[in-house]
Image: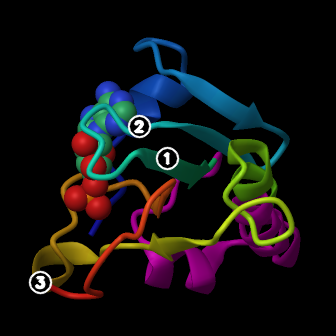
Amino acid sequence: MKYDDNNIFAKILRGEIPCKKIYEDDYVLSFHDINPQKKIHALVIPKGKYIDLDDFNAKASDKEIVGLMKGISIVAKKLGISLDIGKGYRTLSNLSEHGGQEVPHLHFHLFGGEKVGRMVE
Ligand code: AMP
């Protein structure tokens, strides 16, 4: 599958659509989910054009991979849900049809600010 340059997160990265930004560095952009499922629901996306986690792990550089992984923890700290200052959170990434992925640009969800419940409905 080819990366779709017109997906909504690509447009956010290009600044064509606004987002409620939480954090940005050379490797990631993080913003609040437009339709929050929990008290805190953030998204962390890599700046590179990757469709999903498998695509990312196959093609991204080591720096990009480390940047994304560390970015998740940086954002959790900023949101006050990391364990040193908060009570924890859940992160997940949906992959394709069975994973329920809607936006074809890799993203990690961060849910927190309250107990997030069962792992899989
Ligand atoms: P997924 O089903 O894992 O692909 O999740 C896509 C997520 O993107 C959903 O939770 C949507 O609510 C969220 N979303 C879609 N459009 C936007 C947007 N413009 N800004 C922020 N979040 C969005």
Which amino acid lies under the numbered mark 3 shown in the image of this protein?
A: Glu
* In the foreground, 73 or 86: 86
Question: What distance separates the C-alpha of mark 3 from that of mark 1?
Answer: 20 Å
What span is colored magenta in the figure?
Answer: 47-73
Q: Ligand 1 closer than 8 Å to the CB at disc 3?
A: no
Question: What distance separates the C-alpha of mark 2 from that of mark 1?
Answer: 13 Å
**Dot in front, 2 or 1:** 1
Residue 42 tag number = 1
* In the foreground, 88 or 96: 88
Which amino acid lies under the numbered mark 1 shown in the image of this protein?
A: Ala
Label 2 SS: helix
The residue at the point 74 percent across, 72 percent down is 69
The quadrant of the rendered image in which ligand 1 is seen is top left
The residue at the point 79 percent across, 54 percent down is 77
Q: How is the image coloured?
A: rainbow
Does label 3 or label 1 sit earlier along the sequence? 1
Work out which quarter of the rendered image holds the C terminus and state it: bottom left
Quarter of the figure with residue 81 = bottom right
Q: Is residue 18 above or below residue 57?
A: above
| 33 is within the stretch colored magenta | no
Does label 3 or label 2 sit earlier along the sequence? 2
Q: Main secondary structure of the magenta part?
A: helix
Which amino acid lies under the numbered mark 2 shown in the image of this protein?
A: Phe
Q: Position of residue 115 (x, y in %)?
A: 41, 69
Query: Which residue carries the number 3 mark?
Result: 121
**Dot in front, 3 or 2:** 3
